[in-house]
Image (tube, helix red, strand yellow):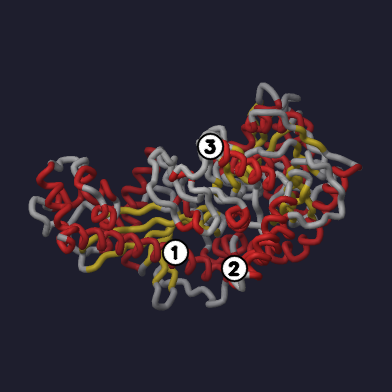
Amino acid sequence: MYMTTELIRQKLKLLPDSSGVYIMLDDEGGILYVGKAKNLKNRVRQYFQNSVTKTEKTMLLVEKIRDFKYIVTRNEIEALVLENNLIKEHKPYYNILLKDDKSYPYIKVNLKEDFPRVEVVRRLKADGSKYFGPYMIGLTAKSTLDLIHAVFPVRSCKGTLSKREKRECLNYHIGRCLAPCTGKATKEEYREVIKKVMAFLSGSDKEAREILLKKLNEAVEAEEFERAIVYRDNLELMDKIVRKQSINLPKDFNLDIFSYASNGMYGVINYTVVRAGKVMGSENMPISEAGDGQDILSSFAMQFYQKNPVVADEILFNLELPFIDELKSYLAELKGGKLNLLTPKGGARGQLVSLSYNNAVENLEKTAERIATKEEMTRGAVEQLKEKLNLIDIPYRMECYDISNISGTDKVASMVVFINGEPHHELYRRFRIKSFEGADDFRSMREVLARRINELKIGKDVSFSQKPNLLIVDGGKGQLSSAQEILADSGIELISLAKREEEVFCPDDSYPKILPRDSLALKLLQRIRDEAHRFAITYHRKLRAERMTRSNLKNIPGVGDKYARALLEYFKKPENIAAAPVEEIEKVPGFGAERAKNVYDYFHKEQQ
């Protein structure tokens, strides 16, 4: 039985039949889950009906719901997009959220160049280039690119070849480039080779295999066994790329396949890629969010294709998606072309979906164990922390601060952010202490926290716009007292962690709390404290190195601290200054010809 409050019962009666997004809230008004619905009345009511079968994870969600709100949308595609935006903005506890780095490499051939390069990229642009991929675990884009250069004599150098070179490079002499930079090959001759490269990337491997075999035999006959081994390894890689398959697929099959398998508590999404009728790769991704499989798959697809381009002609799912038409319209617009979304039951497509689903099922058992361990160390540790320290709220968002300086010079502070017990590096921030000279860690902490609270009021920077549930300072009772002065009226819970004995100091407690050494709560506090220390000391070392570099630059005639800073801001690194011509140094703000020549001469005096 679920605890349905009188507030919820009354609000359920007022739900409209419209499409929209619903937001589930806990007893503190925090967002637990965001979902979309074609019919808000029917969808939201299902959560509170005991007759509706729910997964174990969804039941845990429902037990924590104390209120909800909703946003009516004009149509269903608006609901799809709004749900995705709200999940990214609020990162709800029970929603799926892909990591920011979840993107795959592609191989790019820029057909607008006279002599196109073949290169590995992660971002696709509408620049007239041809893209192949994605390349996944077990078959890297780099190894495929190495294979291309071993077989086809295309250039690997950067640039547009606008300037004619006088001499060929080594790659020409070993047969790995046609040397178009010296005029050895015409545009037409080079284009013929590029056509063969694209044919190979599209699945035609016969000619590439014949070329490799010929090179292998020639190397063996010449007793160049090291080169022969390289060609042998390339042939083995080609076998991996064009490996035999149990399903006979048409060559025009360019598919992305997503399958979801779950044990009710944890799940796995398998992503399989088919290009030119060949299975290029497959990856399993653990999922521990609430909701049914259809909701999880559609949310996953929305987030996935915002980080990865839509290259496939068809996207297949193992479950029927209620929002499949809206998802198709949205993704087709992203692609800028035709796109089909299907849930096939038979034929070659159905076999591929079965293959993908079986892969997910096979991976589920070990994944579930791994997710359970991770959840215990993150979300479990967060809940334990609330219990052990008698906190008012579950510390969903924790921020930890640390001060770093040597004898009062290059004073800096760090802010690291953990959400649900996991670090969110994109929210980390660094501070330079500005308000005073000398060493005073307590005063430094007061300055930093005052700036933090002020930024919270302004609300412009995403790192500062959300109020933390728990703020941690590195240090003992004194550091805690300094922080209390600033946070007195903020409503933010505060603790400090003293490193030597790992004592936890809480406001209004005369004695520190000693958490068991093996407790998950203490280990979480140690992780966030150590991360704040690492982040602070890294920044301190960077500033100290820059100061020492500025000091050295001030040995140059006409260059004081102001111009030393200007040089570093313009060139970023000392080695960039050393490599710059006089004409480039003159572009630094405030530099004239004489000062620029002094800088150039300083770095080149050994050569004069």
Between label 1 and label 3, give the one nearer the viewer.
3
Furthest residue in direction front, as rendered: 221
Disc sitting over residue 187 in the figure: 3
Task: Kindly report the distance in space between the C-alpha atoms of the residues bearing marks 1 and 2.
Answer: 47 Å
Q: Are marks 1 and 2 in contact (CB under 8 Å)?
A: no
Q: Nearer the viewer, residue 307 or 92?
A: 307
Between label 1 and label 2, give the one nearer the viewer.
2
Q: Looking at the picture, how far across and down is residue 441, in whole percent?
A: 27, 63
Q: Residues within 10 Å of mark 2 (few under 14, many from 20)?
A: some
Q: Which residue is mark 2?
A: 227
Dividing the picture into quadrants, the one containing residue 511 is bottom left
Q: Earlier in the sequence, mark 2 or mark 3?
A: 3
Q: Is residue 203 left or right of residue 553?
A: right
Q: Nearer the viewer, residue 424 or 257?
A: 257
Dividing the picture into quadrants, the one containing residue 500 is bottom left
Dividing the picture into quadrants, the one containing residue 49 is top right
Q: Nearer the viewer, residue 359 or 367?
A: 359
**256 up-or-down from 151: above or below:** above
Mark 3 secondary-structure assignment: helix
Residue drawn where x is 84% and y is 45% of the image: 249
Give, as a three-letter code, the residue at label 2: Arg
Give, as a three-letter code, the residue at label 1: Glu
Q: Is residue 39 left or right of residue 423?
A: right
Residue drawn where x is 69% and y is 53% of the image: 208
Q: Residues within 10 Å of mark 3 (few under 14, many from 20)?
A: few
Q: Looking at the picture, how far across and down is residue 110, in whole percent?
A: 54, 39
Furthest residue in direction right, as rendered: 346
Residue drawn where x is 43% and y is 43% of the image: 159
